[in-house]
Image (cartoon, rainbow, N blue to C red):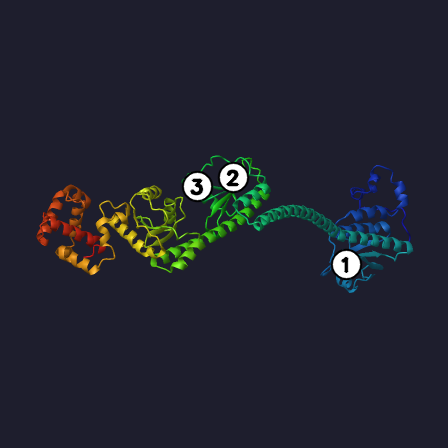
Amino acid sequence: MASHPSRRLSAHVSDQEVTRHPSNTASTERHDPRPLAALDPHGLLVLSHTLFACAEQSEIVRLAMRHVSALGPYHAEAGYLATGDGLSRVPGHDAGAPTVDDARMKELGEADGSVSLPERSWNWAFGLRGVGGLLGYIVVSSHSGPDEQGHFLLSTLVGLTSAAMSLAAMRPAHHDNAGELSRLRAERDTALRQLDTMRSKLHLQKTVHEALARVAARGGGEDAITQALYELTGLSALVEDRFGNLRSWAGPDRPDPYPVPSSTYQEEMLRQVAREASPVRVKDRLIALVRPRGDLLGVLAIEDPEMTANEHTVFALDHAQRSLAQELMHMRELTEVELRLRRQLIDDLLEGTNETSAYARAEAVGHDLQRTHYVVVVHWPGNAADDAFTRAVEQATATTAARPLLTRRGGRVVLLTEARPADDAVHAALAHELGTPDGAIGVSSRCDSPDGFPRCYQEALRALEVRQNSRQRSGTTFFDDLGLYRILGPGNDLRELEGFVREWLGQLIDYDARHDTELVETLSRYFDCGGNYDDAAAALTVHRSTLRYRLQRIREISDRDLTDVDTRLNLQVATRVWKIVLGGRR
């Protein structure tokens, strides 16, 4: 077949299409194309730049098909792309394309081969192949078969097309790989930065752990923990109790005197901090609550007026809070054990226990039973005998003597103390602490040995009962000052006392029981007030005329002359026995 050296690109591939892609071919619009035409008479070099610049395989096939006629007396009948479902005809090239038998194309089995077309003596399907196998076909026809040069040109065109298609197929993968590589590099850089941050953070945390571990190994303590926290953060550290009182301070600028907040402010601050799990900033402080098992034992804080605290500071504060929680919890447990032992000791002493054992147990808890003691019983209506009330009693009775032994019995606090309370001093202190004077205290006589504690306990109870049933129900009563009432103590025969009361008050007691009146109580108050009508009426909160009427009824029912001295004495003693010994029983 004759060659056509003067042919370049076919009319279907313009110079503008070729030169718009980045390549040296762009110069063809500005320079004389004849040197390039001499070197590339069939336009394959120019076409190759265009083919390799295309991103779509279908467009590559169309460009190649347009260029077939530039290689000689050939015609591109059809183009195909290999897909997962077989061969797909490339749209956009319809010159004679419908005459190609698609079924025959499938029979080629990815090989090159002849196809049958009318009015064409030579028809050939050129396979477009890449590394992965068949990429497609270009079907070329001619009135006669190509010569050696024509075959070379067609094969070259097919090779260039195949290479361009392979590149186009690989380009997305390369792009994806480049993007993936960029992403992996970014992730690597981020991971390295995070690793550096974590390494620095772990180093700081290790420093905190080691510092507080050394404190624990040396015995701990609030002062040691606050000092370690100050050294770790460079900020003054402090410990307060739940009421805002300072317990420990480490660092400069300690206030003197230390300001104690109001109870309202303190409670509101504690509620605010308790809502968060981590330390909370309150004004110039970072505050963490020390509350193991939910019990608030204290407040740990650092002074930070310049707001320089960072993540490391918060970590150190949080970790120090945990160390302090363990320390304070241990202290509380020791205190509770000691308190329990002390209460067990006093309970046994009040009931009566072995003297030798009592001395040994008292010495174990740091109390000297060899000294003189007094039993004190405290009762405050409206205040349950709880820990707060017990602490208030302990503080009110604190002296230079040893710490008293305390226990709780029936709503009362009972103490064994070396110092005899001074008149109403304890009562006044408790009235101030509890906010009300409506309480009574009974104090026993002197006790010189453990075997006397049960007796002294009963004496203190007797003194308390006399006080609570007297005209002035609040205050302190000493058993030594009871006078006549001492003989009405528990050592007397109860049956004789009951008989005496029945003899003198029986009719009145029975009348009160039947009619739900208070004639015996009226008579008792009348005697307590020394026979004064106005005082007795005020004590009973009744009108003076009501009191006169009740006294008249008492005379009538009991048939007693209230003006007789002996009768008055016996009635007065009977009312006292009825109230104190019999507890007002009817």
Classify residue 457 by image quadrant: bottom left
Measured Cα–Cα span from mark 1 to mark 2: 91 Å
**Which residue is located at x 91 percent, y 52 percent?**
2
Q: Nearest the camera: 451 or 89?
A: 451
SS at circle 2: strand
Q: For this view, does 349 lie left or right of residue 170?
A: left
The amino acid on which the numbered mark 2 sits, given as a three-letter code, is Arg
Which of discs 1 and 2 lies nearer the camera? The answer is 2
Q: Nearest the camera: 485 or 368?
A: 368
**First in sequence: mark 1 or mark 3?**
1
Which of discs 1 and 3 lies nearer the camera? The answer is 3
* Residue assigned mark 2: 285
Number of residues whose C-alpha sits closer than 10 Å to that of mark 2, classed few (under 14), some (14–19) or many (20 or more):
many
* Residue assigned mark 3: 266
**Which residue is located at x 82 percent, y 40 percent?**
26
Number of residues whose C-alpha sits closer than 10 Å to that of mark 1, classed few (under 14), some (14–19) or many (20 or more):
few
- Image location of residue 68, percent across then percent down: 83, 52
Measured Cα–Cα span from mark 2 to mark 3: 14 Å
Q: Nearest the camera: 105 or 581?
A: 581
* Residue assigned mark 1: 99
Q: For this view, does 146 lie left or right of residue 294?
A: right
